[in-house]
């Protein structure tokens, strides 16, 4: 019985990480396909054939739509937008409070590399489930930056996701 319980607990912790990796893989694949379609559209522009250009534009539009749908599905699956309605009901939890940083505010975007001082242990959100934030992967942390919340890859210092005006 003990082995069964331990095995169940191990499976419960590994399964969400595997599902998240799979959805991230789908999004990466769609981005690759979009880049490929864009390259083909650029080639069609160079050749100058109107029929090819029209077909390639249609393909690019389809690839963009597929990417948007996969990102939306991934966000919905991991509760990316659950916090918004919850925040309106629990304003005190999301109040800014007396919080100051030793550096000035920067509006970070996903993909930007930031310095380690911005995502030090002092700025970690240690209980993201309390704020209804999505679970994080390996070497990732939710970090507070003034009123914004950043999902940072702590190994490389790259911003993965940004939620602006998270705190009131």
Image (tube, rainbow, N blue to C red):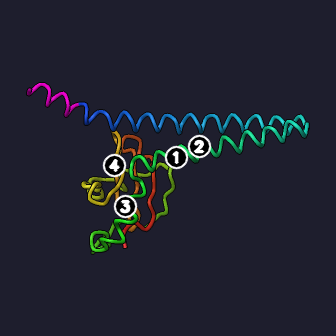
Q: Which residue is mark 1?
A: 71
User: Which residue sits at x=30%, y=58%?
Assistant: 123
Could you classify mark 2 by the number of other residues whose Cα lies within 10 Å: few (under 14), some (14-19), or many (20 or more)? many
Label 3 with label 1: CB-CB less than 8 Å = no
- Give the Cα separation between the discs numbered 3 and 1: 17 Å
Q: Which residue is mark 4?
A: 141
Label 3 with label 4: CB-CB less than 8 Å = no
Query: Residue 77 at x, y = what percent?
Result: 42, 46
Label 2 with label 1: CB-CB less than 8 Å = yes
- Give the Cα separation between the discs numbered 3 and 2: 23 Å
- Give the Cα separation between the discs numbered 2 and 1: 6 Å
Q: Which residue is mark 2?
A: 67
Mark nearer the N terminus (3 vs 4): 3
- Give the Cα separation between the discs numbered 4 and 2: 25 Å
Query: Residue 128 at x, y = what percent?
Result: 29, 55
Could you classify mark 3 by the number of other residues whose Cα lies within 10 Å: few (under 14), some (14-19), or many (20 or more)? some
**Was residue 4 drawn as part of the magenta stretch in this picture?**
yes
Mark nearer the N terminus (4 vs 1): 1
The magenta segment is 1-10
Q: Is residue 7 left or right of residue 94?
A: left
User: Vertically, is 3 above or below 151?
Assistant: above
- Residue 126 position by quadrant: bottom left
Q: How many marks?
A: 4
Q: Nearer the viewer, residue 45 or 57?
A: 57
Please tell me whether mark 4 or mark 2 is closer to you in this view: 2
Report helix, strand or loop for mark 3: helix
Report helix, strand or loop for mark 2: helix
User: Which residue sits at x=34%, y=45%?
Assistant: 136
Q: Which residue is mark 3?
A: 83
- Residue 45 position by quadrant: top right
Label 4 with label 1: CB-CB less than 8 Å = no
Which residue appears farthest toward the front when viewing the image? 1
């Amino acid at each position: 019985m003990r082995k069964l319980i331990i095995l169940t607990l191990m499976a419960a912790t590994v399964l969400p990480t595997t599902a998240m990796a799979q959805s991230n893989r789908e999004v990466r694949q769609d981005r690759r396909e979009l880049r490929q379609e864009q390259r083909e559209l650029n080639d069609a522009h160079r050749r100058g054939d109107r029929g090819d250009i029209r077909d390639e534009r249609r393909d690019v539009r389809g690839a963009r739509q597929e990417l948007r749908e996969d990102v939306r599905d991934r966000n919905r699956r991991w509760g990316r937008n659950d916090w918004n309605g919850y925040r309106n009901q629990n304003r005190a939890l999301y109040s800014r409070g007396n919080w100051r940083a030793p550096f000035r505010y920067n509006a970070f975007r996903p993909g930007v590399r930031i310095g380690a001082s911005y995502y030090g242990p002092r700025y970690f959100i240690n209980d993201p489930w309390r704020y209804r934030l999505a679970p994080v992967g390996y070497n990732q942390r939710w970090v507070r930056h003034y009123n914004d919340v950043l999902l940072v890859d702590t190994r490389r210092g790259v911003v993965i996701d940004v939620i602006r005006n998270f705190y009131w």
